[in-house]
Image (cartoon, rainbow, N blue to C red):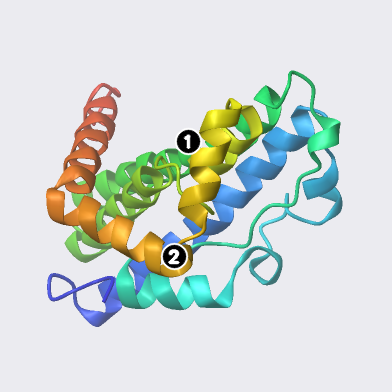
Amino acid sequence: MLFRAQADLTTAIIAFIVMVMALIFHNVVQAFVANRLGDPSPRLAGFMAFDPQRQLDLIGVVFLALLGFGWPRTVPVNPRNYAGRGRAEAWVWLSGVGAYLLAALIATLVATVFLALGSAPLAIAFRLAATTSILHAVINLFPLLPLDMARAALAWGNPDVRRFIQQLAQFGVLGFMVFFFVLSASGIIGRLVFFFDRLIIGIIRLLPGL
């Protein structure tokens, strides 16, 4: 499960709710960036609103609770609305990775405040959500559909890159699970999560009064 023995039920529920909000935030950021870059499609489809019914994928939320990794609905974009041979569209998808990292930064900042106030359970809940959000950012850095980096590469990459991603996509869900297992077993994902976690903590320590 997402929140294993290290957290009690109340802490787990709070962390889960925060992480669900991070999934929604991911989509809102992508929709905002798309709108700023000239594509109103996500905004017109309602993806700039913090609306769980619009943003969340039920299966993705269940996977989040059971396995620690979930996903929201895919933000609808129109490639014809972007200039720059796909570069602008690529930034839309990459902003999703940034959204997860920003959500982790905010959650860690809130955890720091709760810890200073003597509320350790809430601090643990928000830190748990923060590391889970970092995990989502890291996983979305890999070029495997339907992850953000893969969509960015399809939009902006050269024909060889596009062909490679499409070949990987042929393996479907099984291929994704094998890919994820190999990266986890090799420690690559863990090291990247640790790196971004230390980076976020370092940024927060630079803030006055913290």
Q: Which mark is residue 70?
A: 2
**Residue farthest along the top direction in this orientation:** 84
Q: Quadrant of residue 85?
A: top right
Q: Quadrant of residue 37?
A: top right
Tell me if residue 125 comes above or below residue 158 in the rendering: below
Depth check: 121 or 192 in front?
192
Q: x%, y% of residue 181?
A: 24, 61
With 58 as the anchor, is 22 left or right in this view?
A: left
Q: Which mark is residue 172?
A: none
Q: x%, y% of residue 2?
A: 28, 71
Quadrant containing the C terminus is: top left
Depth check: 160 or 12 in front?
160
The residue depicted at 18 percent of the width and 74 percent of the height is 4
Residue underneath mark 1: 98
Depth check: 52 or 161 in front?
161
Which residue type does callout 2 highlight?
Gly
The residue depicted at 37 percent of the width and 48 percent of the height is 139
Q: x%, y% of residue 134?
A: 33, 46
Asked which secondary structure carries label 1, the reply is helix
Tell me if residue 111 comes above or below residue 14 in the rendering: above
Which residue type does callout 1 highlight?
Gly
